[in-house]
Image (tube, rainbow, N blue to C red):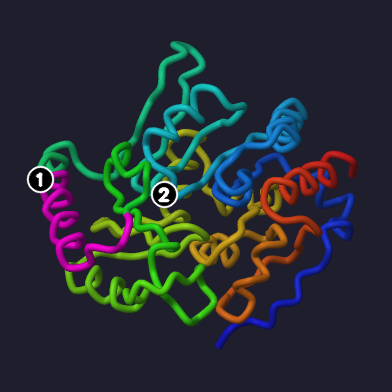
């Protein structure tokens, strides 16, 4: 049964909580970005958070190609990508990108072959659906555009092409994949990782801490169903306003919500956090 969706306005984020926050974990699509674009006010908010000495960790279903760019060019401590298939960071001593993948080196070639075969089988069975335009830069994740599916559960934008969300999910599950639904994609992979487990591994391996040890010093902000595991785990949780579209489907809701959607909502959260 879904939790009652009644987050408090972000303006009620307390001064004592704000002063304690040293780590911000954030989703990317439609949390930092706005319909796929990074707006200037949001990027400035990222810079302001980093300049305040707060470590920013992006936790996204986005592809390796994006994560490479983000880890190198954005003011972030690390990026967990493809829903937890890996994390990336820029080594401060060598200035080189380091990637920790959760698929063993000996299994990567076979995994890539299986994924290619799966894509061909999927598109043969459902020729009208669309893979994400960034699929070419994904290592372990299959991303299907929600806008190419027909649904009646208010989870994605419907287009009457005769292929339902349920049909595609059933196909993927029968192939042994684990699926997650974001604001824009079905993400599917054979690994058992998720956003939380890989963020926990990143904290242990890169930062030398257990995520539970910094729970009072951390905040998470997200926008979609695949952020539920983070809303459940973290103590200080924020949703951008577009999360409200999933109010009836969420099992775990955030504690606070921003007045604005997407990147503008992230900027509002950053402003409140730093002002207090």
Categorize mark 2 by other alpha carbons within 10 Å: few (<14), some (14-19), many (20+): many
Q: Nearer the viewer, residue 236 or 128?
A: 128
Question: Is the residue 9 above or below the residue 273 in the image?
Answer: below
Q: Which residue corresponds to the image point at 64% horizontal and 76% vertical from the top-left?
A: 247
- Using the rendered view, name the quadrant where residue 32 is placed: top right
Give coordinates of residue 163: x percent, y percent: 32, 74
Q: Nearer the viewer, residue 166 or 62?
A: 166
Q: Nearer the viewer, residue 228 or 224?
A: 224
Q: Which mark is residue 198?
A: 2
Q: Which residue corresponds to the image point at 55% horizontal and 49% vertical from the top-left?
A: 29
Point out the residue furthest to the top here. Answer: 94
Q: Which residue corresponds to the image point at 29% horizontal and 39% vertical from the top-left?
A: 136
Give coordinates of residue 28: x percent, y percent: 56, 46
Give coordinates of residue 34: x percent, y percent: 63, 47
Q: Is residue 126 magenta?
A: yes
State which mark lies toward you, 1 or 2: 1
Left or right, 109 with respect to 208, comes to left
Question: Is the residue 108 above or below the residue 14 in the image?
Answer: above
Instruction: Decide which of tag 1 and tag 2 comes sooner along the chain.
Output: 1
* Residue that badge 1 annotates: 110
Q: Which residue corresponds to the image point at 51% horizontal and 30% vertical from the top-left?
A: 70
- The magenta segment: 111-130
């Amino acid at each position: 049964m879904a939790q009652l969706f009644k987050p408090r306005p972000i303006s009620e984020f307390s001064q004592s909580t704000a002063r304690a926050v040293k780590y911000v974990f954030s989703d990317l699509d439609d949390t930092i970005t706005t319909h796929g674009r990074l707006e200037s006010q949001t990027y400035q908010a990222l810079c302001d958070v980093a300049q305040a000495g707060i470590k920013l960790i992006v936790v996204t279903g986005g592809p390796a190609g994006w994560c490479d760019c983000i880890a190198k060019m954005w003011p972030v401590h690390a990026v967990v990508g493809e829903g937890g298939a890996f994390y990336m960071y820029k080594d401060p001593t060598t200035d080189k990108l380091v990637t920790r993948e959760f698929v063993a080196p000996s299994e990567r070639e076979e995994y890539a072959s299986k994924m290619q075969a799966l894509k061909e089988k999927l598109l043969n069975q459902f020729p009208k659906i669309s893979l994400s335009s960034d699929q070419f830069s994904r290592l372990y994740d299959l991303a299907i555009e929600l806008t190419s599916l027909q649904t009646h559960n208010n989870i994605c934008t419907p287009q009457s092409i005769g292929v339902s969300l349920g049909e595609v999910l059933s196909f993927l599950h029968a192939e042994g994949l684990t699926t997650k639904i974001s604001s824009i994609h079905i993400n599917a992979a054979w690994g058992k990782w998720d956003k939380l487990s890989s963020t926990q591994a990143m904290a242990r391996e890169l930062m030398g801490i257990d995520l539970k040890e910094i729970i009072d010093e951390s905040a998470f902000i997200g926008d979609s169903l695949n952020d539920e595991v983070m809303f459940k785990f973290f103590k200080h949780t924020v949703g951008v306003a577009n999360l409200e579209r999933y109010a009836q489907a969420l099992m775990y809701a955030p504690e606070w919500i921003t007045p604005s959607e997407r990147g503008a909502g992230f900027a509002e959260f950053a402003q409140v956090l730093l002002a207090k």
